[in-house]
Image: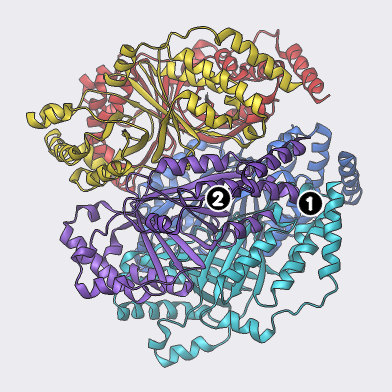
Chain colours: A yellow, B red, C blue, D purple, E cyan
């Protein structure tokens, strides 16, 4: 009977959301959310509980269709990306990256997602919050370096999140010394600029880290080489915590993710 | 039958508490609890267990009405604030901040809340206790700075809790050196005084931290900038632990919180 | 049927233990256990599992009556004190402090308690063991200080446990240097001697700490001030670990504790 | 009925996979995956949940046959090795080591394995990812040493995984200083070259470590002596984390593993 | 029906193992395993899950009889000692210490034990592996000291396990300096040689520690004094980790252990 009850809800959900053409955030708006300063990025990793896999195939599909409805509804104002952790990382089964201009909108989305029948089988321990900001040090870089940084980077299917906490000495350094170190850091990263896409979020005060570094690449070996190159510059001495957790995953569409979770 | 039993209890609760006009702590008393020295503040984060979401809607609503009754009854002598962690922090689903002149009254409230049918679905791992005290260093500050500190601060909807443990060197410093550092700290914080409301609790001996710093703001970016500014002053070198956990959340009324938890 | 079975056991327990006048350890013996050197003190914090609260009121009362029987039986030779953690600390729901001249007697008591129907709903992760010893440093203190230490201290309703691990440098110091530091430590604590009762247990080799410090007070603010004062003396530089966990709680009789747990 | 349902699925699985001759990766291909640079190695430890052992013998056997089908299917393009942790390590019950030229293939395999009926009883917390690379330092070693390193090493039945994170100073050293230290390291390891087989994976940026060191031996005492010898060279001062977890296990065929897990 | 099924298995087990006279490892062989170098010692702590206590008395007794059969069968070639942690340590309910000349035999025993009906209610997180070796430093000690070390030590009923990890500086010291420090260490321990029995296991590369130190005593106060004395010598500065976990327990026969677990 409980199952029937849930199916009724799901069907109702389908009636309400299913056939409605979703007004997904426009490509231009998504571009803004992903590229402009002053946007909040949230990285939320979820573990699917064992009971989920004990449900029958049909119920799971119905539940996943319902959660997809919530994701699509919120895509009208949020940029939501979906990732598969399972099989690459022990920190969860999947991850959502959500960009918004107000964290309370992100919270509303995650609360609504967790209130779906599927959400009731999720546990959520890792949530990282960061803010995109204008580049701190780039304006002080030589012009040649600035130009190189403007070249486009290739992407996917792999993505990684490495949160970082700096030590007290780092923050106590004068701006010009930090600038010099960040220039060395940036030059060390240049050889991988084309094949590894990077994005930086500032998270001091928003969670237990100072930065969330986010990567996308088709060549994991280059991600490895990049992070190794960054380990060798002076600025690396000021990382009090690096990773813990390091999240490695693949970029998936919501439909691909649903296919995996529905199996 | 168990359900019937619980509904009977709930109805009984409603009969007893429901229509009674609650003598909530007066605005003046609440103001005292929130602003005077010698008041204890407790920050208790709760996780709602999975079984809760398996209950039917009606039972959940009844349970939440019952817990609201407990909160309102204790509001006669305690100042109780409610927050939503879910979707912003992995450390729990909601948080209560309780102010009282005696921690045993806070304990009694939390014990009674956990004894409600809803409380039986809660797990409680993070509890921080602190004490409001007269400002240690402000009396030694220049008059101009003291004046600026008297300007009002804006609030909500965001709130954050960052507990801090100082190192042994900090406590070994003579008062005048700590005063000088705290003046630098305070001046670094000034630009955010208007948009970020702060409150300090002393917790040495009451839990594993020395301070609980509490923030409210409508501009999360300013909270970020404030904590970053505080990372750059000399006093920051004496933080042995900072955050872990950092709790980020939104301020909610009890009714708003119940709405989220009842979904 | 299982319930019936349990009730039968409980009733049987009542018949055996209920009406028998318990030969509780005499006040004099309890005094010895609490005040003489060479006595072992065990601090065991317990969490009550969720299933407990799903039992009906009557079964819980019967189970608690049964566990009370075990406590009272062992009070013939052990000094057993009971505390409520719930609502003040995230480390458990209640704590037992047990004093005995042989730890195996304490173990036998806890094993028997965990074998009761109530014990089957308990999980036990934090157990600290310590030993009371003659004062190490007091004999070397000035006479005036010794006299002040003999004044009585007030007690309850609050209690706290702060375990401490010293660093290798501390133990490598010559006795006279440690004596000097402990004299400074003791003098810093003196202003709170009257309102905060302290007791020290030595635990090197018996668990992961060197000392268990135990406090009782009616004025929590003085406990805070005391621990803060102790943070400012030179000896504090040698604390490798301090707290983690810090347990804050209220002293309860076994009947008061049963009342809370039976709700 | 649920059991019947599962058996039907299992039988169906047997019909599909059972009698099909599996095109296992050829010995030559497996050799390449295990010995060439540019190959990814994943170490995934799994814990079997309690509910598994509550299933009847027949259902467990059917589930294990089904998971074996998945393993064998993927052996067409991946090198998959199986290990028993239970009884030697507290970090899980069994471990899979998977080699592939693309981590997404490894992910696909693990996702499919976790989607089998057996997979639904597994929890997976420890996943380490590394990359085989050309030797960094060997080209700079004296010829005599190079020759000695070419001698074959004996293997099994024991295996161990020790992940390592270097400190910032290590990475800041110039290549020639690291070369000198690694030569000392290699010479210290030589006496155990014959009896302990070693393989190195680079994991910077792919998980929270810099290296995953993997060992096979029939003489555990030599593994101990080897790791001890490596603790005594200068390079060991640059290990910020060593082990945590150290995984000790025995190499098992998939059939041997199934026999243990089916009991 | 499940119960009936289990009872049938148990009865079958009794028929097979019950009346068979077990060929326990001879006293001489046990003596060799416990006293000769080149023997592996495994310390495995187990937690009994809550569901166990929900089984009826008879089923539990049958299950425990069955597990006793496994222990006795393996005693033909392994030395197996049993300990009660419950009530003295939060790290589990009981511990097994197993000595064998090959760790794979120990693994086989633990795997078989965990496959019994009782084993299905056990969780196993702490497993430490070590190796007995010829004394490293004793040959360099003065003759008088060597003689004193040959005196017998008293034993039980208490036992403790303290695992230790040394720092990189320790291993980098030349042998003669380590010898001098270990002589100081040994002399500090001498006063407790008679009342506290000690045994050392080397575990570098076999788990996350370098040493497992094992103690037996009837005088716990002497164990405390011994560990305290060892904290005061120079070698103690090189302990990077000491305990975590420290396991305190009582030595029990398998029958005594079964009595406790069957209650």
- Residue A244 visible, this orientation: yes
Q: Please provide percent x and percent y for residue E111.
A: 65, 62
Looking at the rendering, which quadrant does residue A156 occupy? top left
SS assignment at label 1:
helix
Labelled pair 1, 2 in contact (Cβ < 8 Å)? no
Depth check, mark 1 against mark 2: the one in front is 2
Say whether residue C73 is left or right of residue C192. Answer: right
A99 left or right of E10 in image = left
Quadrant assignment, res C239: bottom left
Q: How many marks?
A: 2
Whole-percent x and y of residue E179?
Answer: 35, 80
Residue B44: give x, y in percent of width and height.
Answer: 53, 30
Q: How crowded is mark 1: few (under 14 residues within 10 Å), some or many (20 or more)?
A: many
Please provide percent x and percent y for residue D112: 54, 40
Q: Quadrant of the C terminus of chain C?
A: top right
Q: Is residue C132 visible?
A: no
Tell me which chain the residue with mark 1 is part of: C
Nearest the camera: B51 or C20? Answer: B51
Respond whether the residues carrying marks 1 and 2 are from the same subunit.
Answer: no
Task: Judge whether A147 appears above or below C166 on screen.
Answer: above
Q: Mark 2 points at which residue?
A: D22
Q: In the image, is residue B47 above or below residue C163?
A: above
Disc 2 chain ID:
D
Q: In this view, does C136 lie above or below B36?
A: below
Q: In which quarter of the image is the N terminus of chain C?
A: top right
The secondary structure type at the circle numbered 2 is loop
The structure residue drawn at horizontal position 61% and vertical position 69%, both measured from the top left corner, is E106
Give me the disc on residue C70.
Answer: 1
Residue E25, numbered circle: none
């Amino acid at each position: 009977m409980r199952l029937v009850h849930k199916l009724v809800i799901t069907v109702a959900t389908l009636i309400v959301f299913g056939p409605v053409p979703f007004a997904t955030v426009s490509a231009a708006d998504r571009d803004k959310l992903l590229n402009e300063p002053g946007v909040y990025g949230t990285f939320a990793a979820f573990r699917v509980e064992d009971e989920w896999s004990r449900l029958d195939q049909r119920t799971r599909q119905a539940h996943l269709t319902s959660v997809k409805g919530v994701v699509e509804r919120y895509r009208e104002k949020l940029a939501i990306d979906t990732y598969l952790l399972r099989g690459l990382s022990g920190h969860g089964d999947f991850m959502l990256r959500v960009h918004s201009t107000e964290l309370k909108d992100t919270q509303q989305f995650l609360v609504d997602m967790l209130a779906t029948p599927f959400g009731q089988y999720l546990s959520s321990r890792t949530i990282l919050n960061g803010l995109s900001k204008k580049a701190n040090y780039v304006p002080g870089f030589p012009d040649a370096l600035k130009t190189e940084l403007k070249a486009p980077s290739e992407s996917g299917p792999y993505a990684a999140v490495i949160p970082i906490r700096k030590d007290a000495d780092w923050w106590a350094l004068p701006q010009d010394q930090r600038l010099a170190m960040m220039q060395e850091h940036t030059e060390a990263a240049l050889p991988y600029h084309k094949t590894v896409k990077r994005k930086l979020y500032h998270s001091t005060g928003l969670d237990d880290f100072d930065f969330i570094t986010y990567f996308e690449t088709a060549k994991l070996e280059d991600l490895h080489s990049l992070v190794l190159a960054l380990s060798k510059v002076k600025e690396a001495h000021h990382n009090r915590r690096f990773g813990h957790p390091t999240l490695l995953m693949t970029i998936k569409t919501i439909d691909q993710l649903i296919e995996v979770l529905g199996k």
